[in-house]
Amino acid sequence: MKSVLLVDDEAAVRFGISRYLEAQGLRTAEAACLAEARDAMAREDFGAILLDVRLPDGDGMDFLKEIRRSDPTVPVILITGHGTIAMAVEAMREGADHFLTKPVDLRELEVLLGKALQLGILRRENRALRERPRVLTPFLGSCEAMARLTPLLEASFRHRSPVFIRGETGTGKGLIARLIHERSGQRTEPFVELNCAGLKGEFLESELFGHARGAFTGAVEAKEGLLERAHRGTLFLDEIGDMDVTVQSKFLKVLEEKRFRPLGRVEERISDFRLVCATHQDVEKLIAEGRFRQDLYFRINTLTLTLPPLRERLDDLEALVQHLLGFIAGGRSLPRLDPRALDLLRSYSWPGNLRELHNVLERAYILSDGRELLPSHFFGLGSPATSQPADASPPSQALDLSGAEKAHIARVLRECKGNVPEAAKTLGVSRATLYRKISQHGLRLEDHR
């Protein structure tokens, strides 16, 4: 089993948690700051990461985003001595699997880590399955919004023109980009992708163009750029709206001339690739603000695919759930989805879209026996999620998962006439958990007897 990385600046906390976990048979590695954590992660792939929020050389929440960009499969449990509900909500939205406050209950941590390590194994297996060389056949859906998209998508398979994919975070832009490659004339050539978010100036330029040894501080060896790797294949630039304006001008020249010069080199290289871009941002607004070049926009905007958010695809939800469960089960029998659980999923507004749906189903599968997914398996997963994306206009009647959870608990309490042990058994949770949920949602037992 892989080791657990513990990142905390308090030596006493690291000592106590490490000794306890090692006594339970779990191997641990320690880091007192983000720099040490990065070094440790460069040397070893960890099964899970315990991450303090406040560290001497940076913010744990920012590092969480960095971890998610580099390895979306590793489970992360955030720990802090200054926890708030708002912080917990933000942590879960940024990709944390759990959130604990100090002093840490070691027994609770042991249970959470056991589940997290299992979750990491499942995620890696799913990723390996998805990355096998094959033609991707994702379920696209039959709702009106997807029906409008289908002919445009099919046109992208036949032509080599640039494709610009727009849509909220988590709508499946990366999956569509890979599908376009697999169905195009470039299918036997490389599919090279880069997320432009978080990469600024020289670092983004280095990733795209490559560099010679000594081209800049820290360039200890020569590096091949992604432009060179993508020659004759497909280059997918995710979140192109975050690309530095200085890099935009150089990239535009590459698109026009199909040649470029690595940093620190005199000779030019040739690269002829099919370009697919994606963003969740309002590019027209970026252009008006001077943050995105209009000439580059015209160049990449030959064929635009706009992916609808999941809240506009609720007619497809059941089919999407079955499709995603097929990936999650990894060849095993698909679990039955309790109709009440499906109602719970339908009542949620899904600000994180397909990505959030996948994560919620994945966690529920881990918590279940693999045969049936019940409403209790979705408690707390993906919630509380009361805020909406900045560009979202969800229906006013859409409930968040927390509200659906409250309604479900209230109904079970009424059916059990306020009997907490019986209600807890029906819900599949402990009495302590149910009491906590009753308090959290402001429910009163006397109202349900």
Image (tube, helix red, strand yellow):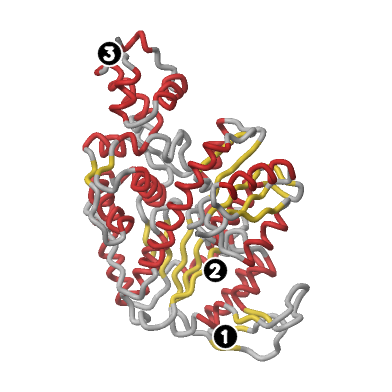
Tell me whether circle 3 and circle 1 mark residues in contact (CB < 8 Å).
Answer: no
Query: In this figure, which residue is indicated by the disc labeled 3?
Result: 417
Please name the residue shown 44% across and 85% down the image: 232
Q: Earlier in the sequence, mark 3 or mark 1?
A: 1
Q: Residues within 10 Å of mark 1 (few under 14, many from 20)?
A: some
Secondary-structure class at tag 1: strand
The residue furthest front is 23
Query: In this figure, which residue is indicated by the disc labeled 1?
Result: 259
Which of discs 3 and 2 lies nearer the camera? The answer is 3
Can you give x and y, in whole percent of width and height, for residue 302 in the image?
Answer: 41, 69
Residue 445 higher or lower than 2, as above or below? above
Which of discs 1 and 2 lies nearer the camera? The answer is 1
Q: Quadrant of residue 423?
A: top left
Amino acid marked by disc 1: Arg
Can you give x and y, in whole percent of width and height, for residue 118 in the image?
Answer: 43, 52
How far apart are the alpha carbons under marks 3 and 2? Answer: 67 Å
Q: Quadrant of residue 191?
A: bottom left
Secondary-structure class at tag 2: helix
Q: Which quadrant of the rendered structure holds the C terminus?
A: top left
Can you give x and y, in whole percent of width and height, for residue 92 in the image?
Answer: 51, 42
How far apart are the alpha carbons under marks 1 and 2? Answer: 18 Å
Q: Earlier in the sequence, mark 1 or mark 2?
A: 1
**Residue situated in front as seen by the camera: 14 or 34:** 14
Please name the residue shown 27% across and 57% down the image: 326
Please name the residue shown 43% across and 21% down the image: 435
How far apart are the alpha carbons under marks 3 and 1? Answer: 74 Å
Residue 404 shows up from this direction: yes
**What number is the disc on residue 295?**
2
Amino acid marked by disc 3: Lys
The residue furthest bottom is 267
Secondary-structure class at tag 3: loop
Q: Residues within 10 Å of mark 3 (few under 14, many from 20)?
A: some
